Amino acid sequence: MLKPLTPQQQKNIVRNVLAACRDIEKLNGTGYKFLNLCAGFIAHYDLNGFKAYYSQPGSLQADIEANAQQNQWHNFRTGERDADYYHSKRDTYNQILAGFCVDQYRKQYAGA
């Protein structure tokens, strides 16, 4: 049985992936592993290949947004084997998406 991501693991992944969307060189192994195992992303051989592929500004965020629907893991229902794991992945993915909204709000309204 797969163990769900802990709240701390989720926080670390979200923080890293959001940083990598601003600067792909900030992507670490934890963020890479999470994204690599999400639908719509391929290994690109390794972390460095992934960084090279997403070196264009905005490209990683665009793919995360484009693959959002496929990364909701709707086929796992509460109580089923590994559902808690996939729901923790869904929650992490959605926190990343929410981070994009916060960043956009800050740019638009807070001048950050």
Image (cartoon, rainbow, N blue to C red):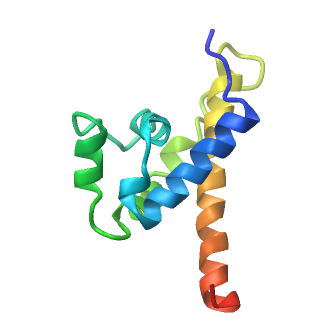
Q: Is residue 111 above or below residue 8?
A: below
Displayed quadrant of residue 5: top right
Horizontally, residue 1 falls left or right of residue 67, namely right
Q: Is residue 76 above or below residue 82?
A: below
Displayed quadrant of residue 88: top right
Q: Position of residue 65 (x, y in %)?
A: 48, 60
Q: Is residue 62 above or below residue 7?
A: below
Q: Is residue 109 above or below residue 47?
A: below
Displayed quadrant of residue 97: bottom right
Q: Position of residue 32 (x, y in %)?
A: 42, 40
Q: Position of residue 64 (x, y in %)?
A: 46, 55
Residue 93 in view: no
Question: For the N terminus, which image quadrant?
Answer: top right
Question: For the C terminus, which image quadrant?
Answer: bottom right
How many marks the image carries: the answer is 0
Horizontally, residue 4 falls left or right of residue 49, namely right
Q: Which residue is pictured at 60% across the width and 55% down the height?
A: 96
Q: Which residue is pictured at 64% across the width and 17% down the height?
A: 82
Q: Residue furthest top?
A: 1
Q: Which residue is pictured at 61% across the width and 15% down the height?
A: 2
Q: Nearer the viewer, residue 69 or 34?
A: 34
Residue 29 in view: yes
Q: Nearer the viewer, residue 12 or 93?
A: 12
Q: Which residue is pictured at 54% across the width and 50% down the height?
A: 16
Q: Position of residue 72 (x, y in %)?
A: 59, 42
